[in-house]
Structures are given as structure tokens and as C-alpha cells.
Image: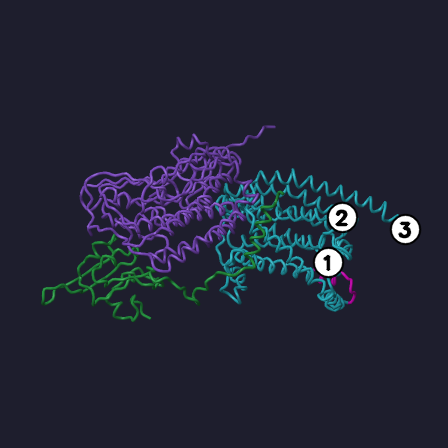
Amino acid sequence: MFGKGLIEGLRITIKRFVGPNLTEYYPEVKPNLPLRTRSSMALKPEKCIACGLCVNVCPNQVINLGSEKDENNKKVLKTYVMNMGRCLLCGLCTEACPTKALGLSQEFENAVYHREELLWDMMARSKQSNTSSGKVE
Amino acid sequence: MDALNNLFVNIAAAIRGLFADSHSFGADLTINSIVFIVLFLIMVVSAMFLSLVERKFAHWTSQRSGPNRLGPHGWFQFIADAVKMLGKEDIIPINADKFLFKLAPMMLVGVTLMAYAVVPFGKGMVPIDLDLGIFYFMAVSSVTTLGMLIAGWSSNNKYSMLGGLRAVAQMISYEIPLLLSLLGVVMITQTFKLSSIVEAQKSVPFIFIQPLAFIIYLIACLAELNRAPFDQVQGEQEILSGPLVEYSGLRWGLFMLAEYGNVVATSAIAVSMFLGGWYGPEFLPGWLWFILKIGFMIFLMMWARWTFVRMRIDHLMHFAWKILLPLSLVNIFLTGLGIYVYELIIVRIGG
Amino acid sequence: MTIEKTQEYSINIGPQHTSTHGVFRMVVNLDGEVVTKVEPKIGYLHRGLEKVAESRTYTQFIPYTDRLDYLAGPHNSLGYVQAVEKLMGIEVPERAEYLRVIFAELGRVASHLFMIASGSLDICGWTPWSYCTRDRERILDLFEMTAGNRMTMNYFRIGGVSHDVPDEFMPALRSFIEDMPEMSEEYYGIFFGNEIVQSRMKSVGILPQELAENLLITGASLRASGVQYDVRKAEPYGIYDRFDFNVPVLYGCDTYDRHFIRLLELQESRKILQQALRDIPEGPVMAKVAKVIKPPVGKVYHRVENPKGEMGWYIVSNGTTKPDRVRIRPGAFVNVQMLPAIAIGWKIQDLITIFASMDLVLGEVDK
């Protein structure tokens, strides 16, 4: 019969109309993200040996590493700045790190108002906060 | 219940009683101005509210929740939309025809408001009870075609010109099945007056006597209102809002007002001619039944919009001239045959 | 009284438009509503990826390959890593091969779902779009569970995949595969079975078989014109020769067939996913490769069956850590030629429908 497809379409629409609602009510209800979600970077400065492997492997030259030699002639980390405006969050730096000092975390509310605030000073962030991503709670 | 039924009629009689002669020119002028303002407010509020209902309906069919920030579950969103629209800049293109550009939305709103004058909202609640009721309504609402064409031509834009010409082709073709489907009802009741047509449906609504005419009317009024599946005048994916593309701010708001006002007016006519007007079981007043039946018609229209895709323009014209028009002529023929048989057999048996 | 004439006019369906899939520009000559000439103008999303590749190492270029056909997930990097492995002669472990097939087929399902969604959105069908996108969210959740990003996964590496899948991946994948037939029924009911859609799309934009072969059209558009050609069967790469699946072919050559064949390909991908889930072994996921990748001097050409067409990778290496030249042959870029050839004589509304059936993604066309 002509029109059978039209009636089938109407039936599907009305079935979904009275069906359940799938909206997540965002600012009131935070989403439940998987463990491995890549949303921002976190550094543990006490584990870093300033080898510079992360700087070399990054495709976009995001990381700026400054180190100095101490009394045993070993490298010690001085400054570590990441330009998050250029970061692809690809994860190659975390795979390259031999001591697992650099990691990814789940904090996704990272929007800022000025471009200078996108240059993250990772050592200062890890000192100021209690979460692993460096975000001040 | 009788008090609630006649609530507005009693208020009007009380206002008339304030004058010395309750049918003098001054009393009539006052009552008509008040009715005019009330109709305008009905049109504005229903247009704003319907745009929100449309968004909510669309989202509920895809398992979402629609706007849900302002007010309880988002039902105050139309206030924010109205305020935003009033605050926008008024842009007129350089080479546009200024007089026609400004005239088009005003014309559409004025014509839609004129069409509300003959709608029977309840028992004795017709603003102007013309003998020509339905004929006046059809004549006045044909002028909307001209409004779309003027908007399309005066914007000096190729996309709007395409939209305006499509509007003329579509709206002219679909007026003929619209009129002919209503002719069946007029043949049965022998009058154009809308309040008499409603009173003739005291025992059985005309949808059971004229089912084919109701379906043809529903399809044709979707085409007249430029709603999907016939909305290629404002085909958003091809010609980007058609004739409305150069309008911004309040001028665009007037177009939306005219569109949703037309939706309510056409549903009101369908309710009066086919679904029994303000008749209903006694536990609710008459004008409330009228509003509920209009709500049912709008639900059907929105359900069709969010399920079906758009038709192509030559299929649309083919559908109007080769399928709907012969069907409505067949309906008239069958109605005439039915009336002849009724008068021949049943009146003889009764009398 | 003079007789008035009509004239042709040209309209610009510009880079900002609601239904060009991205920033694509066409200059169209019209006679009333009938199209007489179409001229596509591309290049609004050109990012110079092939030049960028000359100053990145082989592993650093993998995140850039994800941004080519961004709707198909990790499928683009499959061709690239397999080309480099061919050049270096690396053998990939079994578990990594099966994981690569699973993610490639999931990317194919995601891309086809989005093509059906945007094809319906271009003819004002808002509801099928939301149903297809809702189901695509489940695939993006699977990607996020494994690698962390939803669309640009950066998961494949030269020599395998970067890490193993978590424990909750397999049950979630199994439940998605079980729900796929019901989803296809719903799409058929609301979109493909609808008479208005069929009248809008059948016999519109016919691409004859000979013209398709002459213009080097590849992918599902070729298979909807009657040619049974799929790179997975003609020149199997990876372990595709171990799977049992059909290659659907339709003979209508019109827009409806080009959309419908993607629904059929969804079901074939489901068969591949079921067989991969059944046969996947345990083991390592990365071969023993040096940290610094230096292929020998040479050239290689490798092609894969991308959801949008056939994608070819031509890599020239000069013995150092950075490639000398990387040339990408995208499927969508060559398929753009279809548009001026078959859109003549149809109306504007058909032009938009034909454009949607070509299945372009501007990231791939412009690189």
C-alpha cells in the first residue's frame, strides 16, 4: 500500500517521543569519564630527571625545559613550561618519559580568558594544588 | 458551568452596560477596540509560546530535553528569545527597495490579524459574525502569497528571489484543494457563517461525514503554512531561509509572528469546520475545549514536520495538481450524491 | 509588444553554507531552477600536511594523519604505519593485527553512520540525524576508553599499537555488536523506507559504470554503480584475507543506492567484528622496534580501503629519521570530479542531494 513507509516513520517518532530522555544535565551533574581520558597534562617534578626526551618527541614544540647541573654534575630540573595552545594532547611525551614523571589527567575545564594564561608553568602548578593535574581546587 | 461558559460574554455585556445606550456607536467602538487588543495579544503570546513548543517537541522526538535552563524545565525561554530579538541591529541592504522591504513583514502580520476576526472562540464569542465567514477568511489569507513575493524581490539577493518565486508557485497551487475541500462542508450546512457551521455539528462532528476532505485540508494547510514536508520556500539547506535571508532583528520576528499566527488561525478553522468547534462534554467550558482541540491539530502538524523530509518542487506541484485536486473534486461529487440520496430516501421515510 | 527572454544566472554556494560538508565552494550556473554548469573550488582547509611531514620524524607524523579524514577515527593512520612497516620489513604481532582490524572496522561504521546522518540532514530530515549520531556516540565512547581521545586517537604505532585495551572494552564492544541489527531496522524505518525520501533520491544523479571507471572513482560510490572492487579483497593488507565477508554491489547507480550501500556495508563490518572478537589471541601488542626509526633508502606505495574511497600512501625515504616525501592519495579528493559530470540537468535541490551522496570530508580533500 502506498504510504506504508510514512506511517512506519510516524510510529518510530512517537515511540521515541514518549521514551526515556538521554540528556546529561552538565554543570549540575559532572560526566563520568573513562580512566584514560586525555584532557590535560600533569608533571611530578620530584621524579623528573631532565633528560629532554619529551622535548624531542613532541610534534609541535610544546615543551620548554630548563635544567642546571648541581654539585654531583647531574642534571636537575629548573623550569618546565608547556604551551597548551599548541598541544595536541597526543600522548607521545608521556610514552617517551623513562620515569613516568609526565602524565595525562582528566581535568577538562581549562578555558581561560587571556592567551598568556595558556603557558602553563608545570612546577608551580604541581606545588599549588592537591590534584594530580595541577588545577587549584 | 454555565457561568464559566458565558464568562466572556457576560464581561462584554457589563462593559456595554456602562454606556447610556448599550448599542450606541461609542459602546460598539469600545468593545471592538478591546477585542482587537485581546486578539493581538493572543497572536503574540501564542506565536512566542509555539516557537518554544516546537523546539521542545523536536528534541523530545530525539530523546533530548530541549531548552532547560530558564524557568522550570526551560519554559521561560521565549522571554529570552523575545528580548534578544528586540536588541538586534536593523540591517537594510544597500540596493534593496526600502519601501517594499519594510512593507513586507508588516503586511503579513496585518493580514494574519485580519483573519482572526471570524473565528468562533466559544458560544456567542465571534469578534465579527459575518455572513460571509469562511469566504472572507480564505480571501484574506491568500494575500500572504503576495507578502512573500515582495519580501523575496525587494531584498536584492538571488537566494531570496528564488525563494519568493517558489513561494508563489507553491501557495497558489495549494489554495485550490484547500478551498474545494471546505466546499463539501458548506454544501451540507448551506451557509458560510462560521457560528452556524459549528452549531450544525451539535450531534456529530463533520470529520465522520467528510473524512477525505479533512485529510485533504490537513495536507493543503501544511503547504499553505510553508511547513515541512512542504517547506522548500524556506529550504534551509539549499537557499538558506529563502525570502527571509536579509531580515534581522524585529523584522524577522514579525515574519515568525505571522507564520505561527497563521498556524493557529488555520487550526482554528479546521476545528470549527471539522472537529465540532466548542462543543464537548460538560465538565469543561466551551472555549477551553476549543483551545484543546487547536492543541491537538498543532500536535498533528508538528508530528508530521519532525518525521518527514522535504519534497522536491516539481513533485510538490505534481502532487497538488494531479492528485489533490481530482480527489477534492471527487469529494464534492460524492457529497452532492450523498445529499441527493438523503433527501430522496430518508426524508421520505421520515415524513 | 516585445517578447521577454529569460537568462542564465550564476550563484555562489559559498564556503559558508549550511549543507556543504565543511568549507567547500561551488559556482553554479542556473537556468531557472535547472543546473547548467557546476565548478567546484577547493582549498579552503589546506594545511600543508605533506610539507609538514618533511620536518617530522616518522612517529611524530602519526597525530597529523588522524586529522585527514577526521570522521573515520584511526583508519587513516592504518595506511601510513603499514606503508612504513612494508619499507622496513617489520613483522607485527598477532594481537596487534587483530586490534588494528577491530579499530579500523569501528572507524568504518562511525564514518558510514555519519554519512547517512548528514545525507538526511541535507533534505531536512532532522530526526534520522539525531538517531545516527546517538549511536555513533557509543563508538566514540569505545575509542575514549582505549586511547583517551574521541576522534583523533593516535593509537597505531610503527610495529603495532601503543597499548592494550582495558578490561571493560570487550563487553562494551560485544553489546554494541548485538545492538546493530536493531539500529539498522530503525534507520530503514525512518529514512530509507520513507516514500518521500525514495521519490527524492531514486533515479537522481545517475553515475554510469563506464564513467565511474574512467574518472577513477573508488569506494562505495563505485560499488553502487555495479563494479565489484574492494581493496580488501583485491590486494589484502594486514590479515584481511582471514575474514569471511561479502562485498555488496548495487546496480542502480543513483543517489539512493549510494546511500543504501553504506547501510549494507555496516552489516558486513559487523560480520568482520564478530569474527575478530572470536579469534583474537593473547600476546604482545608491539613488535621489537628501535626507539629511533630509520628506514633504509627506498620508496613504497601502499593502499587501503578507507571508508571514503581508496587511500594511497607513497613514502620516499633517504635513510634519515625524517621522510623525504610523503604523498597522500585521498579517496574523497578524486571523487570530487564526479560532481560536475553528473549534476548537469538536475535542479538545485538535487544538486545538494548528489553532493551529499559523494561523501566528502574536507580534511581529506584539502589535506
Identified by mark 1, the residue type is Val
Q: Position of residue B164 (x, y in %)?
A: 56, 43
Residue matched to label 2: B186
| Span shown in magenta | B20-32
Is residue B150 visible in the rendered image? The answer is yes
x 60%, y 60%: residue: B45
Q: Earlier in the sequence, mark 1 or mark 3?
A: 1
Chain at numbered mark 1: B
Q: Position of residue A76 (x, y in %)?
A: 15, 65
Residue matched to label 1: B126
Q: Say which element carries label 1.
A: loop
The picture quadrant where one finds residue B280 is bottom right
Is residue B18 visible in the rendered image? The answer is no
* Chain rendered green: A
* Chain rendered cyan: B
- Label 1 neighbour load within 10 Å: few <14, some 14-19, many 20+: some
Q: Nearer the viewer, residue C141 or A56?
A: C141
Which quadrant holds the N terminus of chain A?
top right
Identified by mark 2, the residue type is Val
The CA distance from mark 1 to mark 3 is 36 Å
Which colour is chain C painted?
purple
Q: Earlier in the sequence, mark 2 or mark 3?
A: 2
Chain at numbered mark 2: B
Q: Is residue C85 above or below residue A67?
A: above
Badge 1 vs badge 2, beta-carbon distance below 8 Å: no
Q: How is the image coloured?
A: by chain
